[in-house]
Image (cartoon, grey):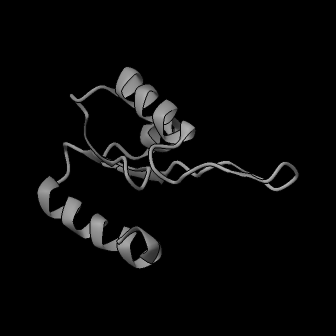
């Protein structure tokens, strides 16, 4: 991610903190606030702060979005990204 940002100072990022599935022991972590999501959220705030990116997240779906503050219309980009997440991952809606 930092490599992409170093090449494109207008880059924004988003991810889903996938839930752990261990079929060998019959374990499936709930999709709400997964371990990955919790760790990624802390790391993003600690490493990148809020000066460069506006952070949005949905803990119930473990989704995270960081929109570059240099971008035009951060609020509109958030709405567009939200629609994209819903289209790609309809179960999140």
How many discs appear?
Answer: 0
Q: Is residue 91 left or right of residue 45?
A: right
Q: Tell which of 66 and 28 is nearer to you.
A: 28
- The x, y position of residue 76, in whole percent, is 14, 63
Residue under the image location 44 percent in, 50 percent down: 62
Q: Tell which of 20 and 48 is nearer to you.
A: 20
Residue 72: tell me if it is visible.
no
Residue under the image location 35 percent in, 27 percent down: 45
- The x, y position of residue 42, in whole percent, is 42, 27
- The x, y position of residue 3, in whole percent, is 53, 38
Image quadrant assignment for residue 70:
top left
Q: Is residue 13 left or right of residue 39?
A: left
Residue under the image location 30 percent in, 48 percent down: 10
Residue extending furthest top? 46
Residue under the image location 33 percent in, 42 percent down: 9
Please say if 88 is above or below 38: below
Q: Tell which of 46 and 24 is nearer to you.
A: 24
Residue 67: tell me if it is visible.
yes
Quadrant holding the C terminus:
bottom left
Residue extending furthest right? 24
- The x, y position of residue 66, in whole percent, is 32, 45
């Amino acid at each position: 991610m930092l490599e992409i940002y170093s090449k494109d100072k207008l880059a924004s990022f988003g991810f889903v903190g996938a839930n752990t599935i261990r079929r060998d022991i019959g374990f499936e972590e709930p999709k709400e606030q997964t371990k990955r999501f919790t760790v990624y959220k802390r790391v993003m705030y600690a490493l990148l702060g809020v000066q460069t990116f506006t952070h949005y997240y949905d803990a119930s779906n473990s989704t995270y979005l960081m929109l570059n503050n240099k971008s035009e219309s951060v609020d509109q980009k958030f709405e567009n990204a939200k629609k994209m997440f819903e289209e790609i991952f309809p179960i999140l809606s």
